[in-house]
Image: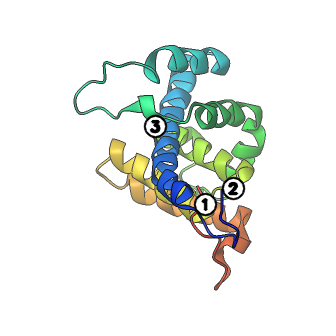
Amino acid sequence: MTGDDDTPTASTASSRPRRAAQRSAARLAAVQARYQIESRGMDPQAVVEEFRRHRLTSDDVDEGQPDLTKADTKHFAALVLGTDMRAGEIAEALDGVLPADWPRARLDRVVHAILITACFELLARDDVPARVAIDEYVSIARAFFAGVEPNFVNGVLDALARKLRPSDFVPGHDRGSRE
């Protein structure tokens, strides 16, 4: 919602941080769901439903654990199901940027879940600026790892984003922080 002069209204501006937090929570939940799908061989739709029933609605948030109840459930489902629907395209895109000595098969499962979810978002969600997606998924990597993994994720996603969305990196081209 904008005012008559196409500037954001107060209600729009105040809802941005909340929407960004909801999407951040959705991304974290999507990475956790992708990990569960891959490690247990579960059906993606069943995992989405499980998360919606139990993890995204629970009032009982464990201390020290992220509060996923604030997740944007539509964004969460789109990420989880989208990675499944476009698995071949995602695999091809990742294979094109991963170092030769670190193929997908060698990746830690959490790193793999982060990368495939981020790759889907870069491929399919042009409403999210590439730099925002990179920052979000590097933050998720930092939540899980204290070693070199966040830097690895950053490098792979930067290369991937520059390949998939070169216009996002043209000097002077500012897509803003639409989220």
Q: Which residue is tagged 3? A: 110
Q: CA distance from mark 2 to mark 3?
A: 25 Å
What amino acid does circle 3 point to?
Val
Q: Nearer the viewer, residue 174 or 140?
A: 174
Q: Residues within 10 Å of mark 1 (few under 14, many from 20)?
A: few
Q: Nearer the viewer, residue 65 or 87?
A: 65
> Callout 1: helix, strand or loop?
loop
Quadrant (top left, top right, bottom left, bottom right) of the N terminus: bottom right
Mark 1 or mark 2, which is nearer the start of the sequence? 2
Q: CA distance from mark 1 to mark 3?
A: 27 Å
Q: Residues within 10 Å of mark 3 (few under 14, many from 20)?
A: many
Q: Is residue 64 above or below residue 167?
A: above
Q: Residue at x 67, y 54 (%)?
A: 122
Mark 3 or mark 2, which is nearer the start of the sequence? 3
Mark 3 or mark 1, which is nearer the start of the sequence? 3
Q: Which residue is tagged 1? A: 178
In this image, 68 relative to 125: left or right?
A: left
Q: Residues within 10 Å of mark 2 (few under 14, many from 20)?
A: few
Q: Residue 6 appears at what percent x and percent y?
A: 69, 69
Q: Residue 96 appears at what percent x and percent y?
A: 70, 57
Q: Is residue 108 above or below residue 44?
A: below
> Callout 3: helix, strand or loop?
helix
Q: Which residue is tagged 2? A: 127
Q: Nearer the viewer, residue 173 or 120?
A: 173
> Callout 2: helix, strand or loop?
loop
What amino acid does circle 2 point to?
Asp
For the residues bearing labels 2 and 1, Cβ distance under 8 angstroms: yes
What amino acid does circle 1 point to?
Arg
Q: Residue 11 appears at what percent x and percent y?
A: 53, 54
**Which dot, 1 or 3, sits closer to the camera?**
1
For the residues bearing labels 2 and 3, Cβ distance under 8 angstroms: no
Question: Which quadrant of the figure has residue 57?
Answer: top left
